[in-house]
Image (tube, grey):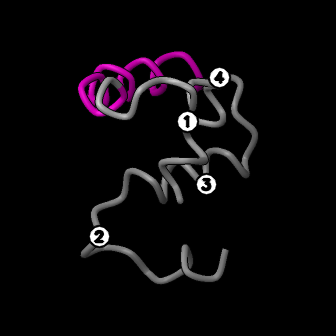
Protein backbone atom coordinates (compact mmCIF):
# COMPACT_ATOMS: atom_id res chain seq x y z
CA UNK A 1 0.00 0.00 0.00
CA UNK A 2 2.76 2.44 0.86
CA UNK A 3 4.41 1.76 -2.53
CA UNK A 4 1.13 2.57 -4.24
CA UNK A 5 0.82 5.84 -2.33
CA UNK A 6 4.33 6.91 -3.26
CA UNK A 7 3.83 6.06 -6.94
CA UNK A 8 0.44 7.76 -6.98
CA UNK A 9 2.13 10.89 -5.63
CA UNK A 10 4.56 10.76 -8.55
CA UNK A 11 1.82 9.90 -11.06
CA UNK A 12 3.77 6.96 -12.49
CA UNK A 13 1.35 4.23 -11.47
CA UNK A 14 0.81 3.53 -15.19
CA UNK A 15 4.42 2.39 -15.69
CA UNK A 16 5.06 -1.35 -16.11
CA UNK A 17 5.66 -2.92 -12.69
CA UNK A 18 8.98 -4.43 -13.77
CA UNK A 19 10.17 -1.03 -14.97
CA UNK A 20 9.21 0.52 -11.63
CA UNK A 21 11.09 -2.17 -9.71
CA UNK A 22 14.15 -1.72 -11.91
CA UNK A 23 14.14 2.03 -11.33
CA UNK A 24 13.24 1.85 -7.64
CA UNK A 25 16.54 3.01 -6.12
CA UNK A 26 17.11 5.75 -8.68
CA UNK A 27 13.51 6.87 -8.27
CA UNK A 28 13.83 7.00 -4.50
CA UNK A 29 16.98 9.13 -4.76
CA UNK A 30 15.07 11.50 -7.03
CA UNK A 31 12.09 11.66 -4.68
CA UNK A 32 14.37 12.26 -1.72
CA UNK A 33 16.12 15.12 -3.53
CA UNK A 34 13.21 16.73 -5.35
CA UNK A 35 10.53 16.77 -2.68
CA UNK A 36 12.40 17.68 0.50
CA UNK A 37 11.34 21.32 0.28
CA UNK A 38 7.74 20.98 -0.87
CA UNK A 39 6.24 18.03 0.98
CA UNK A 40 3.59 18.67 3.59
CA UNK A 41 4.17 17.43 7.11
CA UNK A 42 1.73 14.57 6.52
CA UNK A 43 3.58 13.47 3.37
CA UNK A 44 6.95 13.65 5.13
CA UNK A 45 5.52 11.42 7.86
CA UNK A 46 4.21 8.99 5.23
CA UNK A 47 7.58 8.85 3.48
CA UNK A 48 9.40 8.39 6.79
CA UNK A 49 7.21 5.34 7.42
CA UNK A 50 7.82 4.15 3.84
CA UNK A 51 11.61 4.19 4.18
CA UNK A 52 11.86 2.95 7.79
CA UNK A 53 13.31 -0.55 8.33
CA UNK A 54 10.62 -3.12 9.26
CA UNK A 55 12.33 -4.03 12.54
CA UNK A 56 12.15 -0.43 13.71
CA UNK A 57 8.47 0.10 12.94
CA UNK A 58 6.35 1.19 15.88
CA UNK A 59 3.02 -0.03 14.49
CA UNK A 60 1.67 3.39 13.54
CA UNK A 61 1.45 2.41 9.87
CA UNK A 62 -1.11 -0.28 10.71
CA UNK A 63 -3.45 2.37 12.11
CA UNK A 64 -3.43 4.42 8.92
In primary-sequence order, the first of circles 4 and 2 is 4
Q: CA distance from mark 3 to mark 2?
A: 15 Å
In primary-sequence order, the first of circles 1 and 4 is 1
Q: Is residue 7 above or below residue 16?
A: below
In primary-sequence order, the first of circles 3 and 4 is 4
Residue picked out by circle 1: 7
Q: Does the magenta-highlighted stretch encompass residue 33? A: yes
Q: Residue at x 53, y 59 (%)?
A: 1
Q: Is residue 56 above or below residue 2?
A: below
Disc ID at residue 37: 4
Is the C-beta separation of discs 4 and 2 under 8 Å? no
Residue picked out by circle 3: 45
Is the C-beta separation of discs 3 and 2 under 8 Å? no
Q: CA distance from mark 3 to mark 1?
A: 16 Å
* Label 2 neighbour load within 10 Å: few <14, some 14-19, many 20+: few
Q: Residue at x 54, y 16 (%)?
A: 34
Please provide percent x and percent y for residue 35: 59, 23
* Image quadrant where residue 62 sits: bottom right
Highlighted range, magenta: 20-37
| Element marked by disc 2 | helix
Residue picked out by circle 2: 54
Q: CA distance from mark 2 to mark 1?
A: 20 Å
Q: Residue at x 41, y 27 (%)?
A: 16
Please provide percent x and percent y for residue 55: 24, 75
The residue closer to the viewer here, 20 or 43, is: 20
Q: Main secondary structure of the magenta part?
A: helix
Please provide percent x and percent y for residue 20: 36, 28
In primary-sequence order, the first of circles 3 and 1 is 1
Instruction: Please identify the quadrant where the C terminus is shown.
Output: bottom right
Q: Could you tell whether 53 is left or right of 5 in the image?
A: left
Q: Is residue 9 above or below residue 31?
A: below
Amino acid sequence: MRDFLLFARLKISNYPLVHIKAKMMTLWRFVEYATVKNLTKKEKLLLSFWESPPLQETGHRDSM
